[in-house]
Amino acid sequence: MDRRDFLACVAGASLAQTGFAAPAEGVAAPSTAVDQSWIDPARGREVPVRLHLPGGAGAAPVILFSHGLGGSRAGGERWGQVWAANGFLSVHLQHHGSDEALWKDRNPLAAFASLKRAMNLENALLRVQDMAFVLDELARRRRAGDPLLAAANLDRVGISGHSFGARTTISVVSQMADRRIRAAIAFSPVGEGSELGNRERSGRIRIPFLSLTGTEDRVPLLNDTTPEERRLPFQAMPGPDKYLLVLAGADHMLFNGDPQGRRWSDANRTIHAPLVERVSVAFWQAYLRDDPAARAQLGAAAMQALVGAHGEWFAKN
């Protein structure tokens, strides 16, 4: 393994794939995916997006996805494909300042230092602002008659993200009192470092929330968050409608949703990813479509039976 491969193993856990790829085996493809770049005039800031357009007819609830540190709008690709195949419009953002530009075309040591510097309050704030802008821009474009958004139901919005994007997700739903945001999913959530910090942030979350992590969910050298600490946001959230899935042996890269399964273990590919797909779709169906059957699937006994020996399911109802 050369130094570039070593860096990829360390930082790549948060790096999204940079190009559109065919769906992984067994994943139903959405009708299409479209890349665009939107400009926030108030900030003079570009926000690249990838729209996974929903298959089928009828109104489509909307999901916003925020990538991890060093990622791109290709982050969460596998999840976006599956959600779109199930009738959701999945919009994946790219956040300049904490995206793939931190490491592309740089030597490993420079890339590593760049990634470390980017984990700061300024980028955390920019990400929250990006999410707010995209939510408003979707509404503006739909009113203007954008045919890509004709089916979008912007009264039913979900927020999601991986790693740094999970922190963004928690920040958005704990700070933005936007009635359009009905539910959220955090992949590899990041705790606040103290019980008080988690209570002050995650403790304010009142909407349905699903956290997903694994017993090997760590990023060596890049940060010191332990798999156990990724449970803290769930523990601080008040019920009802809060859920936590902990997959045995699942690592950080799984939750990024790499469509090719690069650097995935066999368990990530054959066991963990299909479980994440089923659980996340059931959650969105339950809370963005008010589907009682899907909500019943999230019950402790039913979901633990599905997960079986591959992990633990926790629910606050």
Image (cartoon, grey):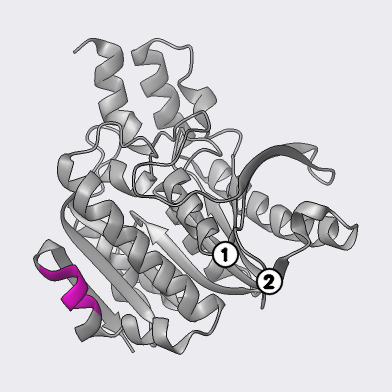
Relative height, residue 238 to residue 151 (above, below): below
- Reading the image, the residue beneath label 1 is 87
Element assignment for label 2: loop
Quarter of the figure with the N terminus: top left
Please indicate whether residue 184 sits to the left or right of residue 224 in the image: right
Label 1 SS: loop
Answer whether residue 307 is magenta in the image: yes
* Side of 54 relative to 140 (left or right): left
Label 2–label 1 contact, CB within 8 A: yes
| Residue located 51% across and 38% down the image | 74
| Magenta stretch in the rendered image | 303-308
Q: In which quarter of the image is residue 296?
A: bottom left
Residue at position x 53%, y 70% in the image: 174
Q: Quick check: is 176 in the magenta stretch?
A: no
- Residue under label 2, please give it: 58
Amino acid at circle 1: Gly
